[in-house]
Image (cartoon, grey):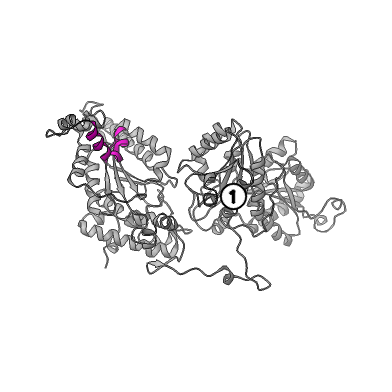
Amino acid sequence: MSLLEHIDGPEDLKNLSEQELQVLAQEVREHIIDTVGEIGGHFGANLGTCELAVALHSLLESPRDKILWDVGHQAYPHKILTGRRDALSTIRQYGGLAPFCSIAESPHDIMGAGHASTSIGYGVGIKEGMRHMGRVDASAQGSETVPGTLQAENEHARDGKVVAVIGDGAMTGGVAFEAISQAGGLGTPLVVVLNDNGMSIAPNVGSLSRYFNRVRLNPKLWHARAGVEGGLTRLPGGIGSAFERLGPQLKESIKAFWAPGLWWEELDWAYMGVIDGHDVRALREALREALAAERPVVVHIATVKGKGFAPAEDGGLEGMEKWHAAKPNSIVDGIPAGPAPSPASNGRAANGSAKAKAPQYTQVFGEALVKECERDERVVGITAAMNSGTGLSILQKAMPERYFDVGIAEQQAILFAAGLALEGVKPVAAIYSTFLQRAYDQIVHDVCLQKLNVVFALDRAGLVGDDGPTHHGVFDIPYLRCLPNIVLMAPRDEAMLVHMLRTALTYDDGPIALRYPRGEGTGVALPGEPRAIAIGTGEILIDPHPPGARETAGGVAAKGRGRVALIGYGSGVGKALEAAEELKDHEIAVTVADARFAKPIDAGLMAQLAAEHDLLVTVEEGVLQGGFGSAVWETLNETGATPRILRVGLPDRYVTHGKPALLHEEVGFTGKRIAERVAAAILDRGHTARQAGSATIGA
């Protein structure tokens, strides 16, 4: 029986030797390779944190001690060690383990954030919260110590330790730097593990390196030091005076040795590193000293992304990127599986020819952007560390001089775009809907207020699937629609996406945003030459009674079943078309329209549909509050029209993770469920409401 089979919680690590802990870390790694290789999920980063998770849980008393995993995509080893070993095969699946840490899933998951760069900020708040509540507890119980003294601080602090694990990539996020500055100013006793998997491990210098670590953690030295040189002159045993005599060259060389930690030291953090992140003994030694220091300490470790899996470990940056996440059934017996069957063998068209697979929206966008850059020299693309995820890797390869990656710094991405726009550039900021939330002030203040020509391309709009509530792009319609000067649009298919990108880049009257979903398009042919769409115009796709035939039309309308207009926005158009097909069985006359724009709304089209139909149904893949349906109602209400409106969208709650089809079924965002609601509204209330002349919203 393996060691891992005996691990049901962190307490089971406490009696293991360091040699056994090293073996356990490898068993955790093998469990991840076998399981994630079969079901899919985040992969490379988790293989790099096996020893770290083992070292942390062997030293700390979770959940009394708090371990914070930035993003959480590197926390699979943590989940395995905290009672979820046998459930790992359900991760990211509907009803299974959450893709990131989840406070509802386990008391060992301290924070549920799925966006990067937040762990240090959480950590500062948690540790200062411990100290504050410790003083509150002491005050309630009575205390003989003098408030405000170091003795009182220590005695009144709750006893838990706090460790924040953050990757070198997440350190590009501005909120991480803000938290570091605050912790240094407060002297918060917090340990940050900087998991650096973007560099090789430099050889240790031996005893001198260990000595410098002790120096950095010696309170008598760091309290007295006013800068690095001051610290060097205070080294014991005559070494400090030697530095004074030997002059600036030697001092500069010693400072260069310290260089990885100089920035931290200047912000009143102690720096330890670089530690081999795959050596459990070295990790435990460093963490033990850092935890005992009772001050802000960063432990800089170097790990290999994809450790233990040769294609990732030996594949350089390309291998690391390829194996950041593993697809289902991509690994068999510890090695990559063979190539997947070609699309031609998976399905056939009616005539027996190979069934073509529709391109991904992301791919269509990336290729269209390259063509727009070729057409207009002013166009550039901006990503926030998601080049492949947004399709900008296509631009990066084709025209690297027109491509910018600002790192995990969405705020800077938008500020950068604003600066470019001020100089006449046409910047396209391609950012996931959920990540653009992080740059909201810059959108409001730096782009919309100044009416700058910035294009926002919001990938992953709607329910994205396995990554769950932290990544669902469901709030962008309301959070952007309320802003002055901005135009909002959404394509119903990949061809319309190409047209809308051209529209956005030929628009010169302020910012414009287009949202589109994750995954495959509908399979329509892409346009040879994109065309600009008139701003604020929709179109009717299905009209059961064309102009000239409405007055004399018989059939279903004459039977009193009512007339319904389904108005879709973006991916909602496809659901509206599906619902229209379902409603044929109910003998209800159905018009289907594509709004195309959520701001400005096509007021003329909405008024026409309201006048000619008994019920308007708006369909959007976003939250209803303040969304597209609300925009339709507001537009009609301002003109004095009060039609019955049934709004279809996403519920007022965070939707779980799982395949989009399962999530759509759960929330009722399917053609069948929409048709059922429409039929019920028409059959139950339509005829009576028409006779009485009543009009309500939310049928």
Numbered disc total: 1
**Where on the picture, by quarter, is residue 560?**
bottom right
Q: Nearer the viewer, residue 53 or 234?
A: 234
Magenta stretch: dominant secondary structure:
helix
Q: Is residue 294 visible?
A: no
Amino acid type assigned to the residue bearing label 1 in the image = Val
Classify 313 as above or below 150: below
Q: Position of residue 661 (x, y in %)?
A: 56, 59
The residue under the point 17% across, 33% down is 235
Residue at the extreme left = 237
Q: Position of residue 628 (x, y in %)?
A: 64, 43
Q: Is residue 269 inside the magenta stretch?
A: yes
Classify 471 as above or below 600: below
**Drawn side of residue 11 relative to residue 110, left or right:** left
Classify 227 as above or below 85: above
Within 10 Å of disc 1 (Cα), the crowding (few <14, some 14-19, many 20+) is many
**Drawn side of residue 471 relative to residue 159, left or right:** right
Q: Nearer the viewer, residue 403 or 520?
A: 403
Q: Is residue 284 visible?
A: yes
The residue under the point 39% across, 64% down is 35
Residue at the extreme bottom = 352
- The magenta stretch is 248-271
* Quarter of the image where the N terminus is located: bottom left
Q: Which residue is denoted by mark 1 in the rendering?
A: 370
Q: Position of residue 228 (x, y in %)?
A: 25, 32
**Drawn side of residue 473 relative to residue 591, left or right:** left
Q: Position of residue 230 (x, y in %)?
A: 22, 29
The residue under the point 34% across, 48% down is 196
Q: Is residue 101 inside the magenta stretch?
A: no
The residue under the point 69% across, 51% down is 529
**Where on the picture, by quarter, is residue 155?**
top left
